[in-house]
Every structure is written in structure tokens, then in C-alpha cells.
Amino acid sequence: MTAGTAWAGISSPGWRATGPRRPTTSGGTNEVPGACARERSYWRELGTIDSYFNAQMDLRAVIPPFSLYNDCWPIATRMSCQPPAKFVHADGDRPGRAVNSVVSNGVIVSGGVIRNSILSPGVRVDGQSQVNRAVILDNTHVQPRAVVESAILDKDVTVLAGATVGVDKEHDRARGFVVSAGGVTVVSKGQVVAP
């Protein structure tokens, strides 16, 4: 058995398998209906911060190596009862926009700029803020003029006005944040990030 492989079946005293052991989640052994050739060879191990982050970044690519938009293989998940994402303040230096990003229901980008990122339900990004290469989980608030780069922000984090995350890795470590070997800063659940 290789890393990332889980076997179907139970192995306990008094029970014998009546057929071959079959992998249920190994790279390339399962067939996803409607998957193209590129998607059939896609596999990511999610055991480290960097591998989790890179898998998220794969999904936001212009042509992702594994598409979430395959109608033959719908995603069965609990949908949050939130309105669609909203982008406001398109005037002057407060553009509310997202480029090459995946933005969930309930997100409001109010004058901030999002690039190459994943935003989970209920995220708020305020005026003149910049988010680049980030995974931001539920109900996190990035206040005005804040900068978030190469980071994972867990649920319910508040990045205060003018604060930075991921810009200066030594400063991030000094504040008690985890910084991965690949340079991804992680802010844990519920923290408030001060300037």
C-alpha cells in the first residue's frame, strides 16, 4: 500500500475478505465520470501545509488540472444558505474584484483586490486591501488596507486595518504564526492579526 491509498474492506479477526482488496482513494485508480485525460492523472497528497495549499491553488488555475465543474461528477456538499458573492466599489482606487480566484457564496469584496486565491463562504475583504495566493476560510474579515500573501487564514480570523500576513515571514513567526517550508503563513482559527 502506498501513501494516500485507503483499502476497501475490513480487516479484523474472524472476518475474511471474499474478493481482492480494492483501493478506494489512490492516485489514478478510481475513475471519475466525465474526467478528461489530464484529470485522470491528477493526484495530490494533502498531508502537509504546502501540499494542501498547492492543491487549493490548482483549483483556481485558469485551466485547472482537476475541474470542479464536471457535470458528470457533481460535488455533494452542504451548501451554506448565503446570497451570491458581491463585488462593490468599482470607482477610483477601490476596485472590488477577483482574478483567477474561486469565490464562494456570501463573500463580499468591498473595494479590495483578490488574485489567485480561494475565498470560503462569508469572507469579507474591505477597501484597498490586497489578497494574493491565499486560502481564506469561512467568515474571515480582511479590513481596509490589509495585505495577505501566500497564506492560509483559518475560520473567523480578523486581519485588522493596515495589517500584513505573509509579506514578512520572520515577522509572521515572531507573532506566533506557522510558516511552512514552502513559505506559506498559517493563521489559526479566531485570531486577530494586528498591524
Image: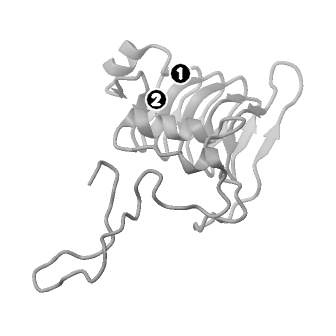
Q: How is the image coloured?
A: one colour
**Res. 111 mark:** none
**Amino acid identity at mark 1:** Ala
Depth order, front residue of 96/47: 47
| Point 53% across, 45% down: residue | 42
Residue 145 percent coordinates (x, y): 65, 21
* Residue of label 2: 193
Q: Viewed as shown, does residue 113 lie left or right of 20?
A: right
22 lies above or below 103: below
Residue 23 percent coordinates (x, y): 37, 63
- Contact flag, marks 2 and 1 (Cβ < 8 Å): yes
Residue 31 percent coordinates (x, y): 54, 61
| Point 65% across, 38% down: residue | 60
Farthest-out residue, left: 13
Quarter of the image for the N terminus: give it: bottom left
The local secondary structure at tag 2 comes to strand
The local secondary structure at tag 1 comes to loop
**Amino acid identity at mark 2:** Val
12 lies above or below 122: below
Q: Viewed as shown, does residue 79 lie left or right of 152?
A: right
Residue 36 percent coordinates (x, y): 67, 51
* Residue of label 1: 163
| Point 70% across, 60% down: residue | 82
Circle nearer the N terminus (2, 1):
1
Depth order, front residue of 138/133: 133
Q: Quadrant of residue 161?
A: top right
45 lies above or below 11: above
Q: Give the crowd class for mark 2: few <14, some 14-19, many >=20 residues within 10 Å.
A: many
The reply to whether residue 138 is in sight is no
